[in-house]
Amino acid sequence: MKSLFLTVAFLSILFLNSCKDKDPKITETIELSEEMKGYFVNYEVGTKWVYQDTIDNNNYDTIELISKRESNSNVRGTLYKGYMLDYLPKKSKNFQVRVDPGANNIYYVKVDPMVTAAGAIIFENNNGTWTTGVTYYDSMEISGTKYYQVINSKSNNMYQFDMKISKDNGIVFFLYSNVNPQNPFGAAYKLIKTIKP
């Protein structure tokens, strides 16, 4: 009888513990700064960016933002509110942008071609200062067009491997290396037009 009582008590405790929430109660929320949203998030799904190759003026690409969703995580009671954006180009490799906030005003962005061992382009901002290989330009001219507040980061992946992003404009320039034998050098795409939905 005593063993039956202990078994029932043990199973009751086990059942009650399994009914508890797996994530701790949220006591703090960390969101992206307006600056980070201006660079990476404040674009509507359906927006298209049209690019022209600066090497071959007859080569164009169009990149469309096909989805944008929140990407939140609860870490020991702190809710980190980030975003995932999916982009679909006509010619270059499709990619995903993940934007995450961190503690102490650190923000981390990963431009991922979603291919195993293909390396991502990283943008990191620590309390308002771009770090980890990111270069900031107050202004930059690309083939006759001037852009302001431009950040640049490079990667050693075999797809998009050098990207310049202008606040509130999106990607204004990127180098693309493809494996097309007719065009082994890839392309140096500059933004020529933005089409909003």
Image (tube, rainbow, N blue to C red):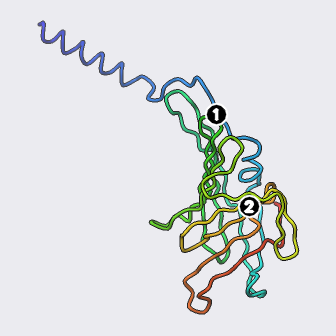
Amino acid, disc 1: Ile
Farthest residue in the bottom direction? 182
Q: Residue at x 83, y 76 (%)?
A: 143
- From this view, report whether residue 22 is shown above or below residue 92: above
Please, what secondary structure does the residue beneath circle 2 have? strand
Report the residue marked by disc 2: 165
Mark 2–mark 1 Cα distance, whole angstroms, equals 24 Å
Question: Quarter of the image holding residue 17?
Answer: top left
Q: Is residue 190 above or below residue 67?
A: below
Q: Amino acid at mark 2?
A: Ile
* Image spot of residue 165 (x, y percent): 74, 61
Mark 2 crowdedness (10 Å alpha carbons): few <14, some 14-19, many ≥20:
many
Q: How many marks?
A: 2
Q: Which residue is mark 1?
A: 30
Query: How packed is label 1: few (under 14 Cα within 10 Å), some, or many (20 or more)?
Result: some
Q: Residue at point 65% right, 69% down? A: 162
Q: Nearer the viewer, residue 39 or 139?
A: 139
- Relative depth, front residue between 11 and 105: 105
Dividing the picture into quadrants, the one containing residue 188 is: bottom right
Q: Quadrant of residue 133?
A: bottom right
* Mark 1 secondary-structure assignment: strand
